[in-house]
Amino acid sequence: MEILRHVVVLVHLIGFAVLFGTWVNEAVHRRIRFTQLMNWGLLIAAVAGIILAAPFGIEWELNYVKLGVKLVILLVIGALLGIGMARQRRTDSLSPALFWSVGALTFANAAIAVLWR
Ligand code: HEM
């Protein structure tokens, strides 16, 4: 059970890496836009994160306040990506506020995961 949990953590981290990595790639190339890979990264992180919210393969209590905060932030990121993608398709441009919010919230969720014990 413990090894299974570690595998799911690995998948969760891959989802985070795909989402944040593709976002950073657009940011450093000064491209204010969302890409389909960001949606995939978020989906992978979400599915693995929800599985990890079940207390299997551990002997300690999970911090459900922390997980609830992470879930709310993930839903906000999903909403911003959805709204942004739709506007991008219609107008071929994306508001910088939407773009930077997704990067900041993704970073915030990783920081919460690592720093809030
Ligand atoms: C964009 C959204 C998310 C990001 C960027 C993210 C990021 C991370 C990172 C970097 C870790 C590794 C931390 C460590 O091992 O110390 C982690 C672990 C974990 N995440 Fe997430 N996460 C996200 C969403 C979620 C959601 C929605 C849930 C569940 C509701 C969740 C549940 C967990 C759990 C249970 C762990 C294992 C370590 C722990 O108990 O804190 N994550 N996450």
Image: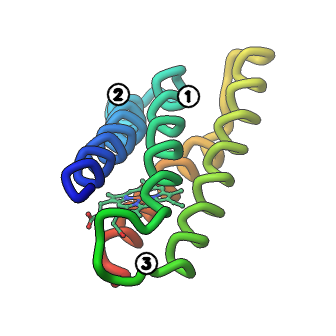
Indicate the secondary structure of the residue bearing disc 2. Answer: loop
- In which image quadrant can residue 21 be found? top left
CB at disc 2 and ligand 1 closer than 8 Å:
no
Q: In which quarter of the image is the N terminus?
A: bottom left
Q: Judge whether 99 appears above or below 49 on screen.
A: above
Of the residues shown, which amino acid type is indicated by label 3?
Leu
Of the residues shown, which amino acid type is indicated by label 2?
His
Indicate the secondary structure of the residue bearing disc 3. Answer: loop
Give the residue drawn at x 42%, y 57%. Answer: 52
Nearer mark to the viewer, of 3 and 1: 3
Mark 1 or mark 2, which is nearer the start of the sequence?
2
Nearer mark to the viewer, of 3 and 2: 3
Of the residues shown, which amino acid type is indicated by label 1?
Phe
Q: In which quarter of the image is the C terminus?
A: bottom left
Indicate the secondary structure of the residue bearing disc 1. Answer: loop
Q: In which quarter of the image is ligand 1?
A: bottom left
- The disc label shown at residue 62, or none: 3
Gap in angstroms between the C-alphas marked 2 and 1: 13 Å
Residue 30: x percent and y percent? 41, 31
Residue beneath disc 2 = 29
Mark 1 or mark 3, which is nearer the start of the sequence?
1
Residue 45: x percent and y percent? 45, 44
CB at disc 3 and ligand 1 closer than 8 Å:
yes
Residue 42: x percent and y percent? 51, 39
Q: Which of 4 and 10 is in front in this view?
A: 4
- The disc label shown at residue 34, or none: 1
Give the residue drawn at x 46%, y 36%. Answer: 44
Give the residue drawn at x 38%, y 31%. Answer: 22
Gap in angstroms between the C-alphas marked 3 and 1: 33 Å
